[in-house]
Image (tube, rainbow, N blue to C red):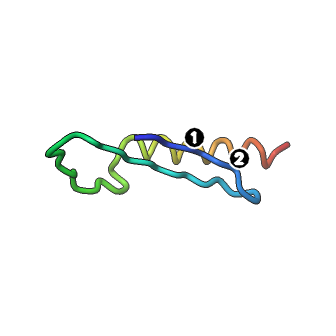
């Protein structure tokens, strides 16, 4: 998995790239809001957004 955070027109864009080229790989069910990595990325993006808004 690759996670890319980009600033576009004053907004933070998260791009998630999932590549699994293994033979017979099984796709896991989406975890949505419960995914700890997405939760951490959201918190990080909000901190970055808040810190840049104050400068």
Instruction: Provide residue 10's location: percent of width, then percent of height.
Output: 75, 57
Residue at 17% from the left image edge and 42% from the top image edge: 23
Residue at 46% from the left image edge and 40% from the top image edge: 2
Residue nearest the viewer, comparing 28 with 32: 28
Image quarter where the N terminus lies is top left
Which comes sooner in the sequence, label 2 or label 1? 1
Q: Which mark is residue 44?
A: 1
The label nearer to you, 2 versus 1, is 1
32 w.r.t. 21: above or below: below
Determine crowd level at label 1: few under 14, some 14-19, many 20+ residues with C-alpha closer than 10 A.
few
Image quarter where the C terminus lies is top right
Q: Quadrant of residue 29?
A: bottom left
Determine crowd level at label 2: few under 14, some 14-19, many 20+ residues with C-alpha closer than 10 A.
few
- Residue to which mark 2 is pinned: 50
Secondary structure under the numbered disc 1 in the rendered image = helix
Q: Which mark is residue 7?
A: none
Secondary structure under the numbered disc 2 in the rendered image = helix
Residue at 34% from the left image edge and 47% from the top image edge: 35
Number of labelled discs? 2
């Amino acid at each position: 998995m690759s996670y890319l955070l980009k600033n576009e027109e004053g907004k933070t864009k998260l791009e998630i790239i999932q590549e699994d080229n293994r033979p017979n790989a099984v796709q896991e069910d989406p975890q949505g809001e419960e995914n700890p990595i997405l939760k951490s990325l959201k918190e990080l993006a909000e901190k970055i957004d808040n810190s840049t808004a104050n400068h």
